[in-house]
Amino acid sequence: MNKELSYLKNIKLIITDVDGVLTDGSLYYSRDNLELKRFNIKDGMGAILLREAGIKCGIITTDKPDFVKIRAERMKLDFYYTEVWDKASKLDEICSEYGISRNDIAFIGDDINDIGIIKEVGFTAAPADAVDKVLKLVDYICKRNGGHGAFRELVDLILESREI
């Protein structure tokens, strides 16, 4: 762990990846070529808890908008960006819109396309089953895997840090 968990009380916004964080990274295909993804309901409750605490939350993903839009709207997220490979490129826009610094942002991601943004924000986390290159860089490694409550685990840590 690169930073103390007490740093979390300063977080004003959480950004998450989708595949490998909100999902387990699996893709399911039907005979009709229908693509399906599985999301964890506990992560959705985490977004509600963040909103109640006044913490913003959004998605930056390389994924296409189909599933992301549906999930982001159900979670009532503040924003979502799709088909973004250079995730750090969105930080200035987000910071400007919400009047925060990069240090006020937590990010959770799982793969090499997340490394750029991991190096740019205040606090970083990864699901337990993230790739090794990411696990070596983040401030916190979740006990849970992607799609199995890793996002909620980070949310709970942030909310608990404010109670101390």
Image (cartoon, rainbow, N blue to C red):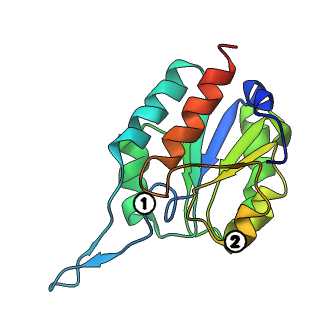
Residue 121 lies, in percent from the top left, at 81, 48
Identified at 77% across, 48% down, the residue is 139
Question: Does residue 144 appear in the picture of this structure?
Answer: yes
Q: Quadrant of residue 9?
A: top right
Between 60 and 115, the one lying in front of the other is 115
User: Is 98 situated left or right of 51 in this image?
Assistant: right
Count of numbered circles in the view: 2
Residue 78 in sight here: no
**In the image, which disc is placed on residue 23?**
1
Residue 72: image location, x then y, percent: 44, 47
Crowd band around label 1 with a 10 angstrom C-alpha radius: few (<14), some (14–19), many (20+): many
Q: Is residue 162 left or right of residue 136?
A: left
Q: Measured from the top left, where is residue 3 in percent x and y?
A: 84, 41
Give me the residue at 61% from left, 64% from top.
110
Per the image, label 1 sits on a secondary structure element best described as: loop
Quarter residue 118 falls in: bottom right
Separation of marks 1 and 2 at Cα, in angstroms:
18 Å
The image position of residue 55, as x and y in percent, is 62, 27
Residue at image coords 61%, 22%: 160
User: Which residue is denoted by mark 2 in the rendering?
Assistant: 132
Instruction: Classify the position of the C terminus by image quarter.
Output: top right
- Give the quadrant of residue 5: top right
Amino acid at pointer 2: Asp
Query: Secondary structure beneath disc 2?
Result: helix
Q: Which mark is residue 117?
A: none
Taking the view exactly as shown, the residue that stands out farthest to the left is 31
Q: Is residue 17 above or below residue 112?
A: above
Q: Amino acid at mark 1?
A: Thr
Answer whether labels 1 and 2 touch (C-beta < 8 Å). Answer: no
Mark 2 Cα shell of 10 Å, populated few (<14), some (14-19), many (≥20): few
Classify residue 51 as left or right of residue 36.
right
